[in-house]
Amino acid sequence: PLLPPLPHPPVMARPSRALLLLLSLTLLALLAPAFYLPGIAPTDYEEGMQLDVFADKLTSPKNKVPYDYYSLSLCKPSEDVTRSGKVKSKHVNLGQALMGDRREPTPFELFMRAPESCKLLCHESLDFKAKRAFKNRIVDDYYVRLSLDNMPSVLKTTGREGQEYIINGFPLGFHDENNKAPLLYNHLEMKVLFHEPKFSPFAPFQGGSDAKVYRVVGFEVSPVSIAHDPPTGDGKAVSTCPAPGAVEAPKGPLIISDDSNALDVYFTYSVTYEESDIKWATRWDPLLKASPEFRRIQWFSIINSCLIALFLTALVAMILMRTVYLDFARYNNMENDEDLEEDFGWKLVHGDVFRVPNNLELFAVLHGTGVQLVLISTFTVAFAFLGFLSPANRGGFLTALLTVWGFSGAVCGFFAASLYAGLEGKNKRLVTLGSALFFPGIAFTVFFVFNVILWYEESTGGVPFTTLLILLGLWFVVAVPLNVIGAYFGYSAKPYEFPVRTNQIPREIPRASETPLLLLMFASSILPFFIVFIELTFIMTSLWNGAVFYMFGFLSLVLVILMVACAEVAIGTTYFSLTRENYRWWWRSYGSTACIGIYIFAYCAIFLLGSHEKGEKMHLLSSVIFLGYSFVMSLAAAFVTGTVGFVSSFYFVRTIYSKIRVD
């Protein structure tokens, strides 16, 4: 050759380049002032540009059934109305549709930095039926959810200690128990918070010019009840609104009477604009900022969880480091069979400890379902913790949850089939169908029955037929085929090679060791439940009271502690069962932690009772829907914790029996 061969590059060249690239990207991320999530970019408004206000839904902390904003006789826009009189909703994602959210246009006319004072929205004449509908919703404490530039309307209130609180939405009216006639809030005081960015990289793509642009960073709404006088002049001038900064209106409140006479209601609104130091990238921070009281509760929850986990860790460490190692020394020092006959403990059941459990098909299906749910919860909470499931992306968390579930069907099929094949099961078709249809079938049946009822009630909680088709497609077109593929690879697994052989004739279990399974499950699941019961309060409030759940860091830490605690509880329960010569540990290890689902369901029932004051009537449909979805959630929690308990016990049992000498 004309040229000598090039020398080989040093071994560390490629790792050094990769490390240099990683450091460069990290430095670039640190120098960046902020980042925007994919598909979520700020909208720049010039002065005088129109701001669109959308109606989401009507929700209540007492009645869990959401309703459409226009299910009441409220002002409708002149456009986007069908022939039947219904307002067309803008497109919403899958998560929003399942949560009952809508995005319906409203007739509010807002223009950037153009204040309005006591502007007439519309006039409605309420007959007896319309008045009764308003009254029922006000008595049930329904709140109105509006949004502006993807920012929810909030109501600022002050607590007893003078601390400021932010409430999502604003009440439809006011009802005093002493005054049977409720008040209707027919005037809205709107405040739009805006920020002027120094530089807008999105202006060229939004048709912007050199004029100043502004971004919406907050939307506050304060409702007032006013018995307006009829408009004068051109029919749009209303003079009975409260003056700026005034506490009371010049006219009295608008009372919804019980008589059959028509009630004339004039809906009005005022708009003010206030410049804020809050930047667009951090505009959700005031809504997500936890109060000092909530932070104290969260830290108390973490400390409580850590103490329980430390107690369980010490218990398991004592079992492993002292008791089990002493057992190893004693069993391995036995010289003849006579010593073995005189001894007692978990070595005596070595010939039965790996005997196939009863109802192996069901056990394999539950195992595969639990592994899939562990994967779903881990991925979803991790993405939320990293900020990819921002509350600005409404419905994103539920959409991500369902997407991960659909594409993780192969995981469920694989682990169910591999366990079944490892224990040399024969009915493979039943396990495959069970892993694909068991838990999704339960969840979809509950969802479909409630959806039909909500359709009849004309609630937004009843999702459209197209959404049902999407869910069925995600199940049968994506999840089920992937489940079958995963099961195909799972059945190719070789049978388990256990450290000891299984006797042909089962050993008789002493009566003294037959602890009732239900008693064992209830007793052993108490400590893991105590780890999560405080966090459950925030989760239930977010799901059913419309609050924004944002403490994913605390939730991630609590879930990790819960998984560790479940593993330790299952190991301890399995060891004590084996020392009492009870080799039926398979279902016991699963049930010792899966019973936490029963405690969670009981806690949900207590939460439902606590959301109603004493003597207050409970809505039957609302209670049934709440308990139905709570049952599905508790069942999922039972599958997750039960699987963690079984897997931990399985490796524990294999380990300890591989360390002893068996002839």
Image (cartoon, grey):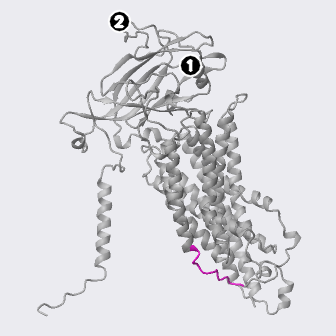
> Picture quarter containing residue 284?
top left
Disc 2 marks which amino acid? Gly
Q: Which residues are magenta?
A: 490-500
Q: Position of residue 219 (x, y in %)?
A: 41, 31
Please, which residue is most extreme toward the left here? 2
Question: Is residue 351 rendered to the left or right of residue 224?
Answer: right
Residue 532 visible in the displayed image: no
Q: CA distance from mark 2 to mark 1?
A: 28 Å
Q: Nearer the viewer, mark 2 or mark 1?
A: 1
Q: Which residue is mark 1?
A: 130
In the picture, the disc for residue 480 is none
Above/below status of 502 relative to 270? below
Q: Secondary structure at mark 1?
A: helix
Question: Dot 2: few (<14), some (14–19), or many (≥20) neighbours within 10 Å?
Answer: few
Disc 1 marks which amino acid? Ala
Q: Position of residue 106 (x, y in %)?
A: 41, 27
Residue at position x 33%, y 49% in the image: 34
Q: Quadrant of the N terminus?
A: bottom left
Whether tag 2 and tag 1 are in contact, CB under 8 A, the answer is no
Question: Is residue 337 rendered to the left or right of residue 387?
Answer: right
Q: Secondary structure at mark 2?
A: loop
Identify the main secondary structure in magenta.
loop
In the picture, the disc for residue 233 is 2
Above/below status of 610 relative to 661? above
Q: Position of residue 647 (x, y in %)?
A: 64, 69
Between 386 and 50, which is closer to the camera in this rendering? 50
User: Earlier along the polypeptide chain: callout 2 or callout 1?
Assistant: 1
